[in-house]
Amino acid sequence: MILYTVVPQEDIFSTGQLQEQNKEMTVAINNVQLVVQQKEDKWEIIRLISSDPNDYLNEHYQPGQLLSFKPYLQ
């Protein structure tokens, strides 16, 4: 079976690991969506989701960068 999709393989073929267990969440900063993961008191950028190529060139949005903010949790 061939799947033509931008969805990561881990999301399609779940291994039973929930996103909440990894403490990952998607946040929007300046109209740029970032997937972040909690590392102690900071958040590490895991993935950038954008259709603007310039966002990928911005060093502030690069995976591995640490952010310090308190996300709004519902």
Image (cartoon, rainbow, N blue to C red):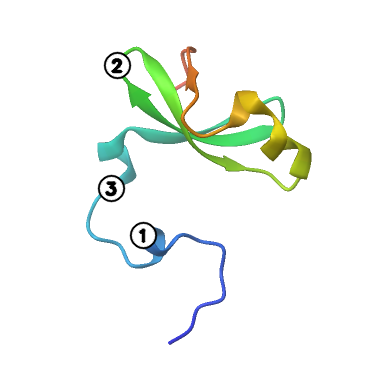
Residue, x 46% and y 59% (percent of image)?
8
Quadrant of the frame with the C terminus: top left
Measure the alpha-carbon separation of dots 2 and 3. Answer: 19 Å
Of labels 2 and 3, earlier in sequence is 3
Three-letter code for the amino acid on which mark 3 is drawn: Leu
Of labels 1 and 3, earlier in sequence is 1
Q: Which mark is residue 40?
A: 2
- The residue that disc 3 covers is 18
Of labels 2 and 1, earlier in sequence is 1
Q: Which mark is residue 41?
A: none
Q: How many marks?
A: 3
Label 1 secondary element: helix
State yes or no: discs 2 and 3 in contact (Cβ < 8 Å): no
Work out which residue is located at the far left of the displayed protein and give it. Answer: 16
State yes or no: discs 2 and 1 in contact (Cβ < 8 Å): no
Work out which residue is located at the far bottom of the displayed protein and give it. Answer: 1
Residue 56: quarter of image? top right
Quadrant of the frame with the N terminus: bottom left
- The residue that disc 1 covers is 10
Measure the alpha-carbon separation of dots 2 and 1. Answer: 25 Å
Residue, x 24% and y 51% (percent of image)?
17
Observer-side mark, 1 or 3, equals 1
Residue 9 spot, x, y in % from top left = 41, 64
Residue, x 34% and y 12% (percent of image)?
41
Taking depth in this image into account, of 9 and 57 the one nearest to the observer is 57
Question: Is residue 26 placed above or below 71 in the rendered structure?
Answer: below
